[in-house]
Amino acid sequence: MLVVKLGGTTVRYGRKDIINKISALTYDTRLIIVVSALAGVTDLLSGGDIEQVRHIHHSMTSNPHTLNIIDNYLNEYSTPTNPSTRARALSIGELISMYLFSEFLGVDHICIPSTEFIRTDNNYSNANIDWQQTGALIRERLVEGGDGCRVILTTGFIGKYKDEITTLGRGGSDYTASIIGSLVGADRIIIYSDVDGLMTSDPKTDPNATLIKRITYRDALEMSMKGAKVLYHRTLEPLQGTRIPLYVLNTFSESTGTVVYGE
């Protein structure tokens, strides 16, 4: 089984590029795809700019069914007044992104939001995973379930505490992919974004920055704790003690990327 995470820039601007790559990946394995909110949408939801969120998504589809899903979620938006209502408001970005991407995927699949299997505590903005409940639900919904589909499309970033939506904090979609990957025993995890992989330093400020082709979990975790932005440090936590390789690849190029591996 393969777990693939699609960043917000990929979903918003790289749809054709990533669909070609996904089509190749589905040839001989089951695939779980974790989708982020479109680039910029979480900030817009946080600021209450619902009509701009609507415009962005409407500009990407004319399918009446998809438009109806988008509008139904956005019409439920209410201005957050506490951490719980803020988590619910921000979750809309991931949910409508999943259904929008579903329209274009082009292979037989099923949509299962991560709120159906990620269970957390009530730290709504940076929730901690209930590993026992989450593991059982992932086995039920993703491993044994899925209605026989080889491809499952899900959301990143969001989970549930009892009947309330929670969020997993900055980098939560990457974290979701590694949670799923570790609990299903994935053959590998791929994170697609708009960068070539982990770099020796920030290429925006250092013209001599070079691509790191291979790095251990331990060293990658150390880099992320020191401020490297490509990988959120929580992403690596579920993979400690496993030998599941994590690939960081660029949607928009054929760069070999970075592979993060267990020792």
Image (spheres, grey):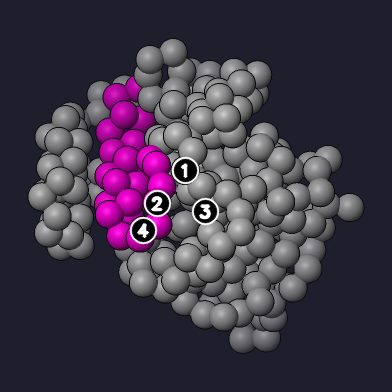
Q: Magenta span has 108?
A: yes
Q: Residue at x 54, y 34 (%)?
A: 142
First in residue order: circle 1 vs circle 2 = 2
Residue 201 seen in the current view: no
Callout 3, which amino acid?
Answer: Lys
Q: Nearer the viewer, residue 237 or 109?
A: 109
Q: Position of residue 129 (x, y in %)?
A: 59, 26
In the rendered structure, find residue 149 and report the number of the disc placed on it: 1
CB-based contact (under 8 Å), mark 1 and mark 2: yes
Would you name the residue on which mark 4 appears? 105
Q: Quadrant of residue 83?
A: top left
Q: Nearer the viewer, mark 1 or mark 3?
A: 1
Callout 4, which amino acid?
Answer: Leu
Q: What's the distance in space between the residues labelled 2 and 3, CA to CA?
A: 18 Å
Would you name the residue on which mark 2 appears? 108
Q: Which residues are magenta?
A: 84-111
Callout 1, which amino acid?
Answer: Cys
Q: What's the distance in space between the residues labelled 4 and 1, CA to CA?
A: 13 Å
